[in-house]
Amino acid sequence: MKHSRNVSYQWIKIGSFAGIISNLIFLLLIIVKLPIYLNFLFASLFGISFSLTGIAIHKLISLNKESILTKIAAIFIFVVGIMYMVMFNAQLTFNGYLEVYQSEVSKLDNIEFLNTLIKTIDSLQLSLQFSIDVLTALAMLLFASVMFKSKFFGKIWSISAVMIALALIGIKCYSFPQTPSEVGIPYVLGPSIALWFLITCIQCLNELRHANNKIKLHKIDATKKLNLNGDNSLNKSFQQIENIIQDQLIGEKLFKDSKLNVQKFTQICNITKRELTEYIRIKEYPVFKDYLNLLRVEEFKLIVRKNKITNYDLVGLAKECGFNSKSTFFRVFKDIEGITPNQFKKSIEKI
């Protein structure tokens, strides 16, 4: 299970970075006129990197709940990336050969054959582009159906995806067999789609960071107990240190003291800084402050759940639990839980 989750994290990271790169390349291709060899290079990079974008979104959503819909959407996006790369490079290749071949054909007075060839290639390209757009729209609709209730995205992501996808399908059907620009529709959907996927990939990386922070802050398995007697620099065993910390920090709820730090706590518990640091390291918390914040968040959640408080001052309650500022509380809560305090409050109200 742990290995599977780690693999998912890697795919989220790879797919998100690839998605960011691909959409920046796409914007570059439509804004800047590049030499043909750079067009070949960037078109290939775009297709390959964009094909991984759907995997990142699917893997992130699957951390909360598996969905066949996002898996299908990821497959659609993968196919779109490959199709785009093939179509764009084939178009560039054909245009290159056409420039050379056109002069020879004109000499032979075989313009009709040339025009027929151009129309055939244009029709194939138009059909391929139509297929790419439809698959992209369907993928966005599938993602939107799951994003609506996903804690990683929410309603705004879902609604925006639906609006862009429906607009894309509507405009393509209206203008076919011509392109939207040929019927007077401004080219705005391409940049809109690129921007949506770009922001979505950034959100994937942001949520991945939150997930990693939460893992770092969780305790290791209770069976992983290490005896520190072999270290001569420590005067107490791991169990003794743990008992002291449990009694004072958790039992007496010293974590509610917003001014509590390592020096103050070690003096109260009569342990050395070295012993406290080693305990925190073995428990796999980054630093003592992170351990305190975890306890404060758990206390906040416990109070809300136990009393089912719905009308309360979030900041006031957070300060009672040991946080000294609103910004710190909201940032720490989001890092640990993956949702905001307000979202947690709403989830309690529904129970």
Image (cartoon, grey):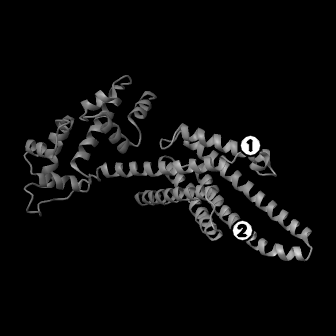
The residue labelled by disc 1 is 170
Looking at the image, which residue is at 66% across and 52% down? 136
Label 1: element kind? helix
Q: Earlier in the sequence, mark 1 or mark 2?
A: 2
Q: In the rendered view, does 48 fall on the left or right side of 309?
A: right
| Pointer 1 local density, CA inside 10 Å: few below 14, some 14–19, many at least 20 | few
Position in image of residue 119 (x %, y %): 84, 62
Name the kind of residue labelled 1 in the image.
Gly
Residue found 18% across the figure and 40% down from its top: 249
Residue 256 image offset from top left, x and y in percent: 21, 35
Foreground mark, 1 or 2, reads 2
Identify the mark at residue 90; answer none if there is no mark: 2
Quarter holding the N terminus? bottom left
Please indicate whether residue 99 sits to the left or right of residue 217 in the image.
right
Image position of 135 (left or right of 267) = right
Neighbourhood count class around disc 2 (C-alpha, 10 Å): few under 14, some 14–19, many 20 upward? some
Estimate the spatial distance between the alpha carbons at disc 1 and disc 2, rounded to whole Å: 27 Å
Residue 314's disc is none
Q: Position of residue 170 (x, y in %)?
A: 74, 43
